[in-house]
Amino acid sequence: MTMDFDNIYTKYSDRLYAAAFNICRQQQDAEDAVQDALIRLYHTDKEFESEEHLKAWLLRVTINAAKSTKRLFWNRNRTSYEEYMDSLTFEDTSDRLLMDEVLALPEKYRIVIHLFYYEEYKIKEIADILKVSENTVKTRLLNGRRILKTKLEGWEDE
């Protein structure tokens, strides 16, 4: 049986994803399990007797990959955003609201704001950590502050 990977992907990816998602319950983990199965197919020397044999093998490999992913330390100890935020202590409600807004920022702004304000790194240190220029850090801080200012403008009234 010859392997046409484009055809195999088109034909089976939805079924493999559904099987993996049923086990993982996480989109990214299910996608990873499907990808792992397809990579194993690409590298295998196994001869498949029929289309049904190939399908069964792919499903078995995908399910095993999904189960392995679910057993990983990271997945066993995953905490939801809400649980994480509830575990933190804030001096008052506005601190929690501010943290929510910071975490809602796009990643490139969120990281520099976190490092600058919460970890108290200097701009040069942040540039070294992120492997970007100091001007990039300054620009991201400026843009992140602008976004936060827009979101927080009505807070003084409350």
Image: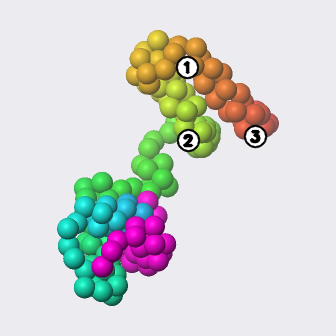
Determine the residue positioned at 30% across, 79% down: 1
* Residue 158: numbered disc: 3
**Residue extending farthest front:** 2
**115 w.r.t. 13: above or below:** above
Given this view, does label 1 or label 2 mark the residue nearer the observer?
1
Residue drawn at point x = 33 percent, y = 74 percent = 2
Which residue matches tag 1? 137
Q: Are marks 1 and 2 in contact (CB under 8 Å)?
A: no
What's the CA distance linking mark 3 and mark 2? Answer: 21 Å
Tag 3 and tag 1, C-beta contact below 8 Å: no
Residue 115 locus on image (x, y percent): 47, 25
Work out whether residue 127 or residue 118 is closer to the camera in this orientation and state it.
127
Q: Nearer the viewer, mark 3 or mark 1?
A: 1
Residue 151 percent across, percent down from the top left: 72, 38
Quarter assignment of residue 98: top right
Q: Is residue 5 left or right of residue 155?
A: left
3D distance between C-alphas at marks 3 and 1: 32 Å
Q: Residue 124 or 80: which is nearer the viewer?
A: 124
Query: Residue 103 shows which numbered tag?
Result: 2
Q: Which residues are magenta?
A: 1-28
Can residue 82 be seen in this snapshot? yes
Tag 1 or tag 3, which sits nearer the N-term?
1
Q: Residues within 10 Å of mark 2 (few under 14, many from 20)?
A: some
Q: CA distance from mark 1 to mark 2?
A: 18 Å
Most frequent secondary structure within the magenta stretch: helix
Q: Label 1, secondary structure: give it.
A: helix
User: Residue 84: image x %, image y %?
Assistant: 43, 50
